[in-house]
Image (tube, coloured by chain):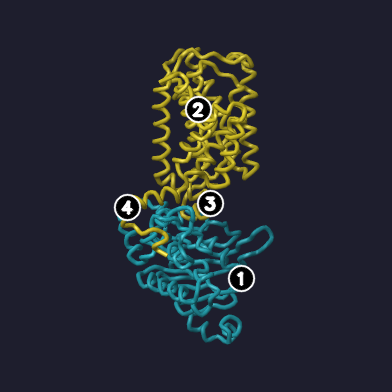
Amino acid sequence: MLLELDNLHVRYGRTEAVNGVSLKQKEGEIVAVLGANGAGKSSLLKALAGIVTPASGTIRYDGEDITKLRVDQRIDRGIVLVPEGRRILISLTVEENLQLGAHQRADRSGLNDEIAAIYDQFSNLKERRHMEASCLSGGEQQMLAIGRAMLAKPRLMMLDEPSLGLSPLLVQQVFSLISELNTGGLSILLIEQNTSMALSVANHALLFELGRTVMAGTAEELTKDDVLRQAYLGG
Amino acid sequence: MSGYLSGVLVAYLLNLIIAYAVFLPGAGGILNLGVAGFVAIGAYASAWLSNEMEWPLAVTILLSMGVSALIGLAISFPILRTRGVYMVLATIAFGEVVVGLLINVEAIGGAAGYPVFEFIDLPVIALCTLAVVLFVVWLMSTRFGLALRAIHDDEPVAALFGVSVRGVRVAAFTIGAAIAGLGGALYGHHYAYVDVIYFTTLVSIYTLLYVLIGGVQTPWGPIVGAAVFSLLPELFRGATEWRYVFFAAVIILIMAVRPEGIITRALLLRLKRRGTIAAPTKEAAQ
């Protein structure tokens, strides 16, 4: 198993955001965490990235207990988060945003080639490499956010609502990029409100309600489930 | 060079050094309104070491920077716990405490001020200023500089990519304190006299204004900002009592037209692109 969560709890004061979640993800899989706003999905990813400390429970990664590791130690192990809302640094240039992704990397050889590879894939980013990132459109910003995370050399990439605020066409593009990255061997943990898109790329999925897993299974099983279809897939 | 011109130039260069002491933490979003305190520490430390110990100036200046940096390092931890207006108040308080302590030390003249015997003139000050400018420009081009600007933009995201937010901020504040110490040491040795009344909070406020007017986004901002404040009043000297009215009007105008400062990153990027015709402009790309 690449990632194993056992009975994870995250609390903010008295509010229980994540209430005893267990999850297993194999290397090379896409796992989608589905659910409405406020279901605790983002808190789960924050706990995995090391931004918030779980109140209890364990996170095992590649056989190692990483529950108490700092953010930078998790990045060293290849756990990288693409935050909700993309969070591009708008007063930095496109290229500086990419370089920030590589901040934690000790091995910097090949960095320029990797940046060049990202530019090859996204010509819009290349054209604007020396402009402030504020000039990018929403879709370009999402590509930059993913490119930035790629430069941290992830083994497990976590994406928090990558489709948020994007047009349907751009959502398609983002998800085909996610599939592509996965085909290249990257494991992906995905949080989405766009249930149908998420299920179309995921191997496994969990449905969250109020910090608990209320349903889990393969993406196929969940796609066929009547309750899920009615509540989240519009019949 | 006439005495008047070199006098104005020295004032500008010293202001510029101190401006970098404010710029560096400022680039990471830290407002230091206690910079005059670090300038005072540097001035008194180098003056005392050269007067009493009779050590060479190179040694006393480096030591005074070290003392200022150590005190900066020590107070950066409580100060960086505060945010926004509380940080402003905490740094002002630091500056006032330094002045309050120095005025009560008889060994360095107390309220009567302290004469400084070793003299430093314009060429050395110019070289030191150049060194500070080059150092800060270099520092801002490194990974440290990128981390500092990332913290200024979005602290949680900087942390998300492994930037040690606290470490980078402490380092910026401490290096800033060392630069302020250098400015203070040069000040004392040039004017041959130090007195706590030269290191009030007003000095800190002015210095912050140089940085804000020049622009906090690039290390070139303080050069312009300090020039506006140090040289512009001289140009209006002919207008006698009206000169500060003109000066204030110009400052207000600059702040209205360029709220991010005169030298912004966008401006520099535009200038750079003008140099390379092949690169598409923002307008052409859209």
Amino acid beneath label 2: Gly
* Residue under numbered circle 1: A37
Amino acid beneath label 3: Glu
At numbered mark 4, what does the secondary structure look like: helix, strand or loop?
loop
* Residue under numbered circle 2: B181
Q: Residues within 10 Å of mark 4 (few under 14, many from 20)?
A: few
Circles 1 and 2 on the same subunit: no
At numbered mark 2, what does the secondary structure look like: helix, strand or loop?
helix
In the rendered picture of this protein, how many numbered marks are placed on residues? 4
Mark toward the start of the polypeptide (3 vs 4) = 3
Give the number of the disc on residue B276. Answer: 4
Q: Are marks 3 and 1 in contact (CB under 8 Å)?
A: no
Spatial CA span between label 3 and label 2: 28 Å
Residue A155 in sight from this viewpoint: no
Query: To which chain does the residue with label 2 belong?
Result: B
Can you give x and y, in whole percent of width and height, for residue B238 in the image?
55, 27
In the rendered view, would you say B66 is above or below B173?
A: above
Spatial CA span between label 3 and label 4: 33 Å
**Toward the viewer: A2 or A115?**
A115
Can you give x and y, in whole percent of width and height, for residue A108 in the image?
34, 52
Q: Are marks 4 and 1 in contact (CB under 8 Å)?
A: no
Query: To which chain does the residue with label 4 belong?
Result: B
Residue A173, image quadrant: bottom left
Chain that appears cyan? A
Spatial CA span between label 4 and label 2: 40 Å
Can you give x and y, in whole percent of width and height, for residue A68 in the image?
52, 55
Spatial CA span between label 4 and label 1: 47 Å
Can you give x and y, in whole percent of width and height, for residue A110 in the image?
30, 56
Query: To which chain does the residue with label 3 belong?
Result: B
Chain that appears yellow? B
